[in-house]
Structures are given as structure tokens and as C-alpha cells.
Image: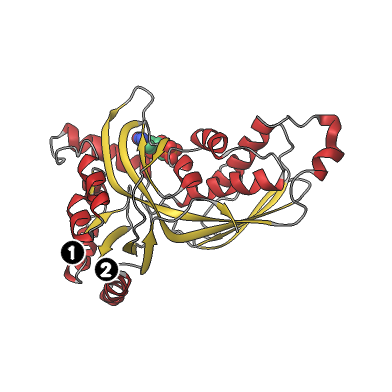
């Protein structure tokens, strides 16, 4: 535990931490397996998921300031509220309260991860803020302590502190790394026009299940974990699964055309990412991913198609 800052200790606090800007890069996540269990008394669903961090990044820069401010550029500028409701501001305030330091910083976000896309962009920004402000303020918390604060901000935030490939349980906030020999997997990420609300997608799954219109729940991720160990994309393709996919497709039927177009372009498999509407496709290698992305871009079934690889590290100072 770091020694707490004391109100009469301002000079000392100013000496701790970084004088110059702190820049943090944070990846997007996809779920290779997203098993959704029943609703819990607190309204969350019990999950068994395998998170995977991919090479599409947001960047957060933190500078010293006299108050807490947030500016942004890139994806979602003009749409995303930059006030106290923003996960970046909430993360900065949560760290400041935990470490008992003033929440003073000028934060600037450069966004590439689409908003409300099922890639955990907002959660990624919160994770980046925790890492950036921890360095800026010299609070020097461990990754595990940062992940503990992260869990209070959102279910996906702890994973984005660690990155890599990891098992998520509870509401997704309990994260343990998946140990595997290093292998890169190549993905095509098809970004849709507009987003989907995560709570609305979970509610739609509950409705489909109540009407017996949802597929059987995926349950445990054991076969996905075994496929990861085999390091063969053809094997991994058969093990990918997402219980939220039926609900996203029900709310956004056009996504079935996106999934079909990716498979027609030669992808080994395609799934909705998280709560959607982004779709991700597994490719055999980087060149294969580039060909699929070019075909998808030309087909008009998505706003943009990017190539990416994973796993990559979580939020890191660069
Ligand atoms: O944890 P987070 O705030 O990111 O979750 C957003 C929403 O997604 C929750 O309010 C809830 O409606 C839904 N959710 C859920 N079960 C989970 C995670 C999220 O129902 N395990």
C-alpha cells in the first residue's frame, strides 16, 4: 500500500510523480468465448468469458493541471460526453479517492476504438486513465491494486489493465491470465454504423431466453482454452462462441449479412464481438486478414474493416 498523501503535504506531492506528460496506450478487447449465465440479484449476469486484447488502440495523455479536465479527438468526437459521466473522469476520481491525492490532471484522449461497439472502448479508456494518473501522481500502485479500483468502474476494466488473453468470471471483473505458448492470432474487425447499448443487448438475451428463442448457453470455456493451446487457427475457429450474438442479431438483423460476407471472403470464422455490433473474423495469417478486410471494405456491409492481431499487452505507458 502506498503511503497516503496528506493535505499539508502539497509540495511533497508535487515532487512525486511525473512533471511532463504521461502517454498511455490501451488496446480494444474481443471475447473469444462469452458464456452468459443467469441474471444475478444485483442485475448483472454471471459470465465465463475468455478476453483477448487486440492491436487497435486508444491513447490517453495526462498532464499536470489545477483541476480535472478531459478533451478528445478521433472516433466519437462530438458524440461522447466529456463530463462526470465519462469513464475517464470516473476512473481519475476513483484513483484519487483511493490514493488520497487531489484529482488534478489535464487528460486528452485520442480514440480509434469505436463507441458502443462491443470492443470495450470506454472501459479501455478508464484503464488507460488509471495507469496514466498513477504515473502522473506518483501513487505507484500495483497492477492488482489498479485492477481492484478498475472493477468498481466497469466489468471489463480490470482485463484492460492486464491485456493478453485471460479468463473472466463473476460479472467479468475477476480476471486470471490464460497461460499459453506465445502465438499471434490474426483478426479482421468490421465496424458497424452506430452502436448498441450493452444493457439493451443483455435484456434482449433475457427476453429471448424467457421465450425459449435463444440457443443453448455455451457454458464453460474449456474447449476454447484447449483450442488456444493447439495454436491452429482452423481449430480455434470452431471453438469461438458468444451467447450475446443471438441478442445482437435480434436487435440488429443486418449483422447477419456482415457475418455472411466475412465468411464468403474466406474468414475461418466470424462472431459478434461482445455485445456488438462490431463483428470479428479469424484469419489464417496477416496476409489473409488483409485480403478479407479489403473484400469486406468493398462489400458495403460495414463502415470500416481493420486488420488486427492479438494478444497484446494491456494499458501501458509509452
Ligand atoms: O459493468 P459495466 O458497467 O460495463 O456493465 C454495463 C451493463 O452491462 C450493466 O449495467 C448490465 O446491464 C450489463 N452487464 C450484465 N452482466 C455483466 C456485465 C454487464 O448484465 N456481467
Looking at the picture, tell me which residue is in the foreground, 9 or 210.
Answer: 9
SS assignment at label 1: helix
Label 1 or label 2, whichever lies nearer to me, is: 1
The answer to whether residue 84 is seen in the rendering is no
Neighbours of disc 1 within 10 Å: few (<14), some (14-19), many (20+): some
Coordinates of residue 23 in the picture (x, y in percent): 63, 57
Check disc 1 and report the residue beneath it. Answer: 260
Coordinates of residue 288 in the picture (x, y in percent): 27, 73
Quarter of image, res 156: top left
SS assignment at label 2: loop
Task: Give the answer, above or below, for where 308 lies relative to 48.
Answer: below
Neighbours of disc 2 within 10 Å: few (<14), some (14-19), many (20+): many
Residue at the spot 72% in from the left edge and 43% down from the top edge? 137
98 with respect to 188 (left or right): right
Ligand 1 falls in quadrant: top left
107 with respect to 79 (left or right): right
297 with respect to 157 (left or right): left
| Quadrant location of the C terminus in the rendered image | bottom right
Residue at the spot 71% in from the left edge and 40% down from the top edge? 103
Check disc 2 and report the residue beneath it. Answer: 301
Amino acid at each position: 500500500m502506498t503511503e497516503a498523501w496528506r493535505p499539508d503535504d502539497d509540495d511533497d506531492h508535487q515532487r512525486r510523480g511525473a512533471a511532463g506528460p504521461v502517454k498511455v496506450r490501451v488496446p480494444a478487447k474481443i471475447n473469444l468465448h462469452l458464456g452468459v449465465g443467469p441474471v444475478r440479484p444485483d442485475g448483472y449476469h454471471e459470465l465465463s468469458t475468455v478476453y483477448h486484447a487486440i492491436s487497435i488502440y486508444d491513447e490517453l495523455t495526462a498532464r499536470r493541471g489545477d483541476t480535472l479536465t478531459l478533451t478528445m479527438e478521433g472516433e466519437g468526437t462530438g458524440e461522447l460526453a466529456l463530463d462526470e459521466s465519462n469513464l475517464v473522469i470516473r476512473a481519475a476520481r476513483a484513483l484519487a479517492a483511493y490514493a488520497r491525492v487531489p484529482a488534478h490532471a489535464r487528460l486528452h484522449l485520442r480514440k480509434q476504438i469505436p463507441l458502443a461497439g462491443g470492443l470495450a472502448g470506454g472501459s479501455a479508456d478508464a484503464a488507460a486513465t488509471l495507469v496514466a494518473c498513477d504515473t502522473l501522481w506518483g501513487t505507484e500502485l500495483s497492477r492488482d491494486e489498479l485492477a481492484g479500483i478498475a472493477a468498481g468502474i466497469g466489468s471489463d476494466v480490470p482485463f484492460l489493465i492486464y491485456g493478453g488473453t485471460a479468463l473472466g468470471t463473476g460479472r467479468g471483473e475477476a480476471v486470471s491470465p490464460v497461460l499459453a505458448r506465445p502465438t499471434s492470432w490474426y483478426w479482421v474487425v468490421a465496424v458497424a454504423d452506430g452502436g448498441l447499448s450493452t444493457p439493451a443487448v443483455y435484456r434482449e438475451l433475457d427476453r429471448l431466453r424467457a421465450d425459449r428463442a435463444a440457443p443453448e448457453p455455451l457454458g464453460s470455456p474449456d474447449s476454447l482454452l484447449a483450442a488456444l493451446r493447439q495454436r491452429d487457427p482452423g481449430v480455434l475457429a470452431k471453438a469461438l462462441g458468444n451467447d450475446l450474438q443471438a441478442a445482437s442479431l435480434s436487435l440488429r438483423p443486418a449483422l447477419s449479412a456482415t457475418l455472411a460476407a466475412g465468411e464468403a471472403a474466406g474468414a475461418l470464422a466470424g462472431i459478434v464481438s461482445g455485445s456488438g455490433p462490431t463483428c470479428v473474423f479469424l484469419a489464417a495469417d496477416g496476409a489473409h486478414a488483409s485480403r478479407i478486410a479489403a473484400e469486406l471494405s468493398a462489400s458495403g456491409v460495414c463502415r470500416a474493416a481493420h486488420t488486427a492481431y492479438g494478444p497484446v499487452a494491456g494499458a501501458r505507458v509509452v
